[in-house]
Each structure stands twice: as structure tokens, then as C-alpha cells.
Image: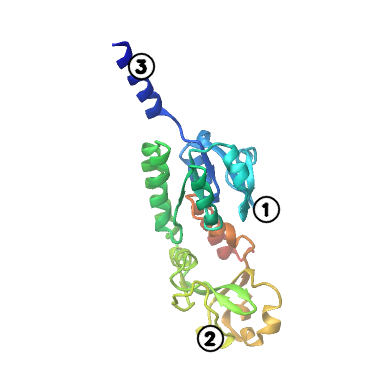
Amino acid sequence: MKKILIIMSLFLITLNAKERLVVLDPASIETLFMLKAEDQIVGIATLQHSNIYPKDQTSKLTSVGTFSNPSLEKIVALKPSLVILSSYSLNLEEGLKNFGIKSINLKADRLEDITKNITTLGQITKKEKEAELLKQEFAQNLKKLSDKPLNKSAIYLYSSNPLMAFNDNSLIADILRLIGIKNLSPQSQISRPVISAEYILKQNPDILILGIGAKNNLLDTNALLKNTKAVKTGSIYFNKDTPILLRLSPKIIDRIQEFKTKLENNNF
């Protein structure tokens, strides 16, 4: 009888054991906090040029290096039960396996991937109820963002030399459509196709939005763009927060709303 009780106790301890997560993906960190599973995070990769929500708490977490260069040694020292990789740290998978450490990479390319990742992280952390509520809230807030569409057209440039745009089957295109902006970038299997100034002029967008690689000397090196509606009406905007806008966690709702408000008020 005593032996059975011991076995049952060990089983219950195992059943209720919390994960020890090292999270190298900023979107997953934010999602875990929104699931109230932050106590299961033992280490994160930090960002050099932006913050991770909620800043006051994530800034206190143990760092295993930067997002683009996490340290295998530091990760192993934390004895994680699972490492959540980012697209920048897939090369660590084999090394982690050699130490008997499991890892996963959550695909995140489009808005619909956020819901799938909430489900997965909820299952990992045993926060299934919180995940269901978060998914419902996310869906409701996505719908609200489509209220009062801007009814404009735009091209969102990734870089200016060469001219590269976010294609029409990208996350940026999803965001633009959500807030009522027709994306005039081409459909392409290439995520950031090279386009020409002639192409932009022919499409003649109401708005030109510039990512962090598209600000410098755009009109000096592409004089044709001065003939577009966007430039003639002063509707050319530099969005320094492009990388944060592309972070696929439920916090993207707030970031899209801020982006939409700036476009409405010409306030970049």
C-alpha cells in the first residue's frame, strides 16, 4: 500500500511539474506572458534594438545572449526542459539534442499562425483555458481593427537600394488589408521581390510606406516616384517600428492599431 502511495505521489508530481522554458523567440515570450505562464520561463534571448512585452518583467529575465546570437552554453546551464527556437537559432537544434534537450520552432509567417501558436504554448504550459480565452479575445480584436477601413492603396517598401517590396502574400499585406488598404505590391514566391520605380509609378499608390531599409535617399535615387500620388500628397511614411509590427504575438493587435492611427493622422 505504501509503495502504491509513493508511486501515485510521484505520478502527481510529474503530472503537475512545470516546464523550464528557454525562449529564443520574442513573439513566444510575449504570448507566454499573456497566458500567465511567465513563471515557466527560465531564460530568454534579448533584443538589441527593441523591447519585449512586458518590458518591466522581461528585462529582469535571465539572458542567454541576443536574438541573433544565443549561447548554447548559457542555455544548457539553465537545464531547460524545452527550448523554443526562433528562425535565427535553428542551428542550435542539433547541439541541444546532443545534451538531451528538446526544442521546437513555432512557425509564424501570417496572422493565422498566431492562433495556432497560442494553442501550442497553452498545451505546453498546461494553460489550455487561458489559451482559449486569449484566442477568443484575439479574434474579436482582429475584427475590430477592420472597422472604419482607410480605403486607400499602398506599397510598403522593405528597401530602397534595390527597391524591394513586401509581396502581396505576406504578413504586411495581411495587415494592410485588415485596416482597409489595398496592397499594390506584386504576388510572388519571393517574400521581398525587387520592383522598379516604373512599376510603382504605374500602380500609383495613395501611400508609400518605408521600412527601415528604405529611408535613405529614396527620392534622390528614384526620381520617378515624385510623380506618384503618394509623394504629391505628402503621404510617404517611414515606419521605424516595422520589425516590431512583424512580431507575431497577440500584442500585434496594439501595434496594428497604432500603425493604423498614425496613417489616419499622418503622424509618423
Q: CA–CA distance between discs 2 and 1?
A: 35 Å
The answer to whether residue 235 of the structure is visible from this angle is no
| Quadrant of the snapshot with the N terminus | top left
Secondary structure beneath dot 1 equals loop
Q: In this rendering, which labeled residue sits more in front, label 2 or label 3?
A: 3
Amino acid type indicated by mark 1: Gln
> What residue is rendered at 46% in x and 79% in y?
186
Q: Which mark is residue 6?
A: 3
Work out whether residue 182 or residue 244 is closer to the camera in this orientation and state it: 244
Q: Residue 199 carries which label?
A: 2
> What residue is rendered at 64% in x and 77% in y?
160
Q: Is residue 142 above or below residue 157?
A: above
Q: Label 1, on which residue?
A: 48
Q: In the figure, is residue 265 to the left or right of 35?
A: right
Secondary structure beneath dot 2 equals helix
The earlier-in-sequence mark between 1 and 3 is 3
- At label 3, counting other C-alpha atoms closer than 10 Å, the crowd grade (few under 14, some 14-19, many 20 or more) is few
Work out whether residue 72 or residue 213 is closer to the camera in this orientation and state it: 72
